[in-house]
Amino acid sequence: MSNAYDIGLKSEVFAKHFLEQKGYTLITERYRAASGEIDIIATKDDFLIFVEVRYRKKKRDAIESITLLKRQRLTTAAQHFIANNSELIKKHPFIRFDVVLLSKDSSIIHHIENAFGETL
């Protein structure tokens, strides 16, 4: 892995496969809106799930890297996606934000469901 961009892409691939193994259905990756990007959008059961993937050398650094501003940007991007995908919302009316953490100091993928404790 040569640079931060490559590491980010590889981390998203690991996270994607991890979520698929847990029964998630992937809708799209790297969704871009004016406010920012959502790494993975997926569904499971009645939930539409917006996933932020973070890789850092240490797990603690990965958690701390999701600032209030980052959360606000994710929320705004999610609102944009929802506004443009009303049919999907009818099938999956519940919304949550998950975080998948990968770190150099651990071979374990950490998945935090409903990480922000809020819904739209």
Image (cartoon, helix red, strand yellow):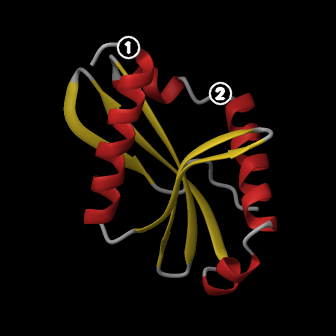
Regarding mark 1 in the picture, which secondary structure is present there?
Answer: loop
Instruction: Residue 40 in the image: state x and y as whole percent.
Output: 51, 52
Disc 2 residue type (three-letter): Thr
Query: Residue extending furthest bottom?
Result: 91
Disc 1 residue type (three-letter): Asn
Instruction: Residue 116 in the image: state x and y as whole percent.
Output: 62, 48
Q: Is residue 31 above or below residue 12?
A: below
Q: Is residue 76 above or below residue 46?
A: above
Residue corresponding to mark 1: 3
Residue corresponding to mark 2: 67
The part of the image, by quadrant, that contains residue 97 is bottom right
CA distance separating discs 1 and 2: 22 Å
Q: Which mark is residue 54?
A: none
The residue shown at (45%, 32%) is 54
Instruction: Residue 73 in the image: state x and y as whole percent.
Output: 74, 38
Left or right of 38, for residue 11: left
**Viewer-nearest of discs 1 and 2:** 1
The residue shown at (25%, 64%) is 21
The residue shown at (39%, 41%) is 12
Instruction: Residue 43 in the image: state x and y as whole percent.
Output: 50, 71
Regarding mark 2 in the picture, which secondary structure is present there?
Answer: loop
Of residues 103 and 11, the one nearer the viewer is: 11
Q: Is residue 86 above or below residue 105?
A: below
The part of the image, by quadrant, that contains residue 70 is top right
The residue shown at (28%, 54%) is 18
Left or right of 67, for residue 39: left
Q: Earlier in the sequence, mark 1 or mark 2?
A: 1
Binning the other alpha carbons within 10 Å of mark 1 as few (below 14), some (14 to 19) or many (20 upward) gives few
Query: Residue extending furthest top?
Result: 2
Q: Quadrant of the N terminus?
A: top left
Q: Quadrant of the C terminus?
A: bottom right
Binning the other alpha carbons within 10 Å of mark 2 as few (below 14), some (14 to 19) or many (20 upward) gives few
